[in-house]
Amino acid sequence: MSFETKTCVVITCDGGCGGPWEDGIPHFDSEDQAVAYARSQEWVVTGTRALCPRCAHEADCKQTGHQWSDWRDEELHGVPFQRRWCDHCGDADYNPPYKVLRLKFQALRDAERIVFDAERAQP
């Protein structure tokens, strides 16, 4: 059995996600090949940074602001709220804020558990 050491180039996202390669990180023989492939996959590659599409959109929204859709009325488990999405990065915004909604949803789950336990305890 013989072993051979080879050097390759990989590209990772500078946005913090590490690069969302679905089928594993691709390996290339040169930086030019890696950059060409990343750009063909809609990455933003400059002389100093490489951002996957999602991180590029998030960085753009952070710099220029979100592109919010109109508010939409929604209801979940009897709790009414509004939601909108950024048409650019996909981020969601809630009215009331999600922290408030999360507390309401938790209270509903707690109440459902109490009712379930009470019904189960009946003879």
Image: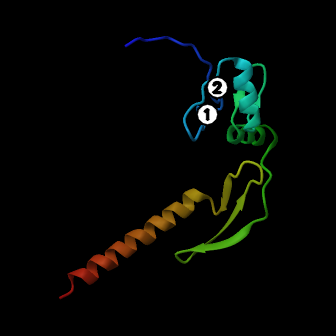
Is residue 8 in view?
Answer: yes
Residue under the image location 69 percent in, 72 percent down:
73
Name the one closer to the observer, 58 or 46: 46
The image's colouring method is: rainbow
Name the one closer to the observer, 73 or 12: 12
Give the distance between the C-alpha atoms of the residues marked 2 and 1, in whole angstroms: 8 Å
Identify the secondary structure beneath mark 2: loop
Image quarter hosting the C terminus: bottom left
Name the one closer to the observer, 104 or 117: 117
User: Can you tell which quarter of the image residue 26 is in?
Assistant: top right
| Tag 2 residue | 11
Q: Are marks 2 and 1 in contact (CB under 8 Å)?
A: yes
User: Can you tell which quarter of the image residue 20 is in?
Assistant: top right
| Tag 1 residue | 19
Residue under the image location 72 percent in, 31 percent down:
37
Identify the secondary structure beneath mark 1: loop
Q: Amino acid at mark 1?
A: Gly
89 w.r.t. 95: above or below: above
Q: Position of residue 61 (x, y in %)?
A: 76, 43
Q: Amino acid at mark 2?
A: Ile
Q: Residues within 10 Å of mark 2 (few under 14, many from 20)?
A: many
